[in-house]
Image: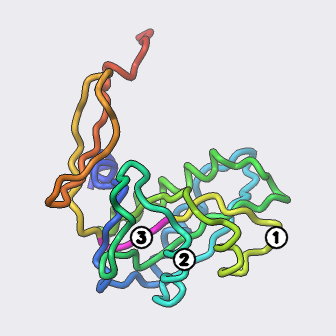
């Protein structure tokens, strides 16, 4: 599969086939991809906690908020919840300001998931203190993001929109998820080629 196809396939999926488990080995493979990505000053401050165990998954799920733009949707229903999680941590002793590392690592893991016909969503809306207690996260680590992963069951449509149009994602009654994207010519301010 070409990179452009992986990028198109890599959407923020929020509904999954909960009967299709993710193996711990798959989560480890995704972290192995993140491990070899660039890191600011090569400091490598990111650490990871993994879960593919249904009981722990339920507890993690309870700390997350889903789809801020979908005000009438509380998140995936039972049967459509993620089957795996990668909790991305920053070791504060190494570099407490590692936002670039987090973005690079998470996007790489999601592309790896897409290559395996999995999908995921980067979730930043997390009750961090509660999740840290549940997972017994060491005090010198902060939760950057949670990657929710699984086999997607929703259809996502990319739509090209004009620069003045809304880019707020939305769902149709049949569950089709629409993601507006600005046109390339509206993003490039100037080219010196």
Coordinates of residue 6 in the picture (x, y in percent) = 31, 53
Which residue is located at x 62 percent, y 75 percent? 49
Residue at mark 1 to residue at mark 3: CA–CA distance? 26 Å
Q: Is residue 20 magenta?
A: no
146 w.r.t. 170: above or below? below
Residue under pointer 1:
139
State which mark lies toward you, 1 or 2.
2
Describe residue 39's horizontal placement relative to residue 82 as left or right: right
Q: Extreme right residue here?
A: 93
Circles 3, 2 touching at the beta carbon (< 8 Å):
no
132 w.r.t. 67: above or below? below
Which badge, 3 or 2, is on the more N-terminal residue? 2
Residue under pointer 3:
149
Within-10-Å neighbours for mark 1: few <14, some 14–19, many 20+: few
Residue 125, by quadrant, is bottom right
Which residue is located at x 33 percent, y 75 percent? 77
Within-10-Å neighbours for mark 2: few <14, some 14–19, many 20+: many
Residue under pointer 2:
60
126 w.r.t. 179: above or below? below
Which residue is located at x 24 percent, y 47 percent? 178
Circles 1, 3 touching at the beta carbon (< 8 Å):
no
Quadrant that contains the C terminus:
top left
Q: Secondary structure at mark 1?
A: loop
Residue at mark 1 to residue at mark 2: CA–CA distance? 18 Å
Q: Secondary structure at mark 3?
A: strand
Which residue is located at x 40 percent, y 19 percent? 188
């Amino acid at each position: 599969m070409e990179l452009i196809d992986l990028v198109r396939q890599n959407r923020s999926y929020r509904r999954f086939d909960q009967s299709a488990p993710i193996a711990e080995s798959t989560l480890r493979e995704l972290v192995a991809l993140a491990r070899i990505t660039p890191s600011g000053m090569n400091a490598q401050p990111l650490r990871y906690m993994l879960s593919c165990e249904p009981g722990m998954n339920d507890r993690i799920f309870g700390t997350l908020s889903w789809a801020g733009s979908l005000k009438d949707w509380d998140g995936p229903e039972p049967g459509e919840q993620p089957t795996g999680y990668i909790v991305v941590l920053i070791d504060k002793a190494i570099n407490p300001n590692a936002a670039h590392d987090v973005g690079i690592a998470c996007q790489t893991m999601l592309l790896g998931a897409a290559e395996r016909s999995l999908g995921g969503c980067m979730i930043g809306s997390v009750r961090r203190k509660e999740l840290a207690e549940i997972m017994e996260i060491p005090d010198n680590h902060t939760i950057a993001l949670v990657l929710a992963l699984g086999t997607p069951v929703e259809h996502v449509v990319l739509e090209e929109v004009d620069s003045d149009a809304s880019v707020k994602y939305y769902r149709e009654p049949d569950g089709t998820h629409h993601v507006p994207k600005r046109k390339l010519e509206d993003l490039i301010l100037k080219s010196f080629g």
